[in-house]
Amino acid sequence: MNIDTILKFFVPKDHSFFPLFESDAENLVKASKVLKDMMAVTDYNELENYNKEIKDIEHIGDEITNKTYDQLNKSFITPFDREDIHELTAHIDDVVDSINGISRRICLYRPKKLMPVYGEMANLIYDAAQEIKNAVDCLNDPVANKEKITIACDKVKEIEHRADELYFVGVQQLFDKEEDPKELLKNNKILEILERCVDEEEDVTDTLKAILIKMA
């Protein structure tokens, strides 16, 4: 047990991080909800509006990330390891960045039509974001809320497995039915970043599980 761990038993912890964690998770849910709604439209003018909304949300996420890092730099005793705070913040930021990347590429590539699997994967991204928020909202007392956090993390893992299956189904459908090489490349790239986004959500829960282990 290192000196920092020992000190945490005796020195009051800085609870200013929890509102930042909760705001970050809520911002992720907002971004994923807009992405989910975006996949249900066909008009490119509407798609551009959704893309702008996601971009604005991504900027808010960057501000929360910077505030968290600033707080980390000036805090002597943190609620849990500094490395875990940094990782949790960075991973949530990665997911929101990926959501922004998905919407930007759809507007940039302008595929002739959005594959139905896009909507299914966007729904999974949204579901996983909600589970992340459920877990993050319990971080103010991770020991007492261990079961709730664990259940939420396990659900994200299940969602990630379903997203993998959807990805391979989507790729198979794409290569079976799409004859235009340009459309094939566009849609394949969008499928890749949708699948990667869910992987990044699982990265968030890996950090949450690491926090639980250290706090036990």
Image: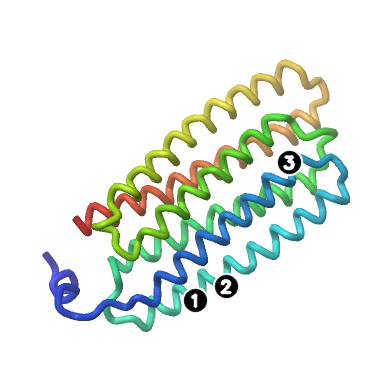
**Label 3 crowd bin: few (<14), some (14–19), many (20+), radius 10 Å:** many
**Which residue corresponds to mark 2?**
63
Question: Horizontal and vertical percent for residue 50?
Answer: 76, 54
Q: Quadrant of the C terminus?
A: bottom left
Q: How is the image coloured?
A: rainbow
Q: Earlier in the sequence, mark 3 or mark 2?
A: 3
In the visual, does 168 lie left or right of 22? Answer: right
In the visual, does 216 lie left or right of 186? Answer: left
Residue type of the residue flagged with mark 2: Glu
**Which residue corresponds to mark 3?**
39
Quarter occupied by residue 190: top right
Q: How many marks?
A: 3
Question: Horizontal and vertical percent for residue 206?
Answer: 36, 48
- Estimate the spatial distance between the alpha carbons at disc 3 and disc 1, rounded to whole Å: 31 Å
In the visual, does 60 lie left or right of 24? Answer: right
**Which residue corresponds to mark 1?**
67
Circles 2 and 1, Cβ within 8 Å, touching? The answer is yes
Q: Earlier in the sequence, mark 3 or mark 1?
A: 3
> Relative to 126, does residue 6 appear above or below in the rendering?
below
Residue at point 40%, 69% (across, down) = 18
Residue type of the residue flagged with mark 1: Lys
Question: Horizontal and vertical percent for residue 88?
Answer: 41, 59
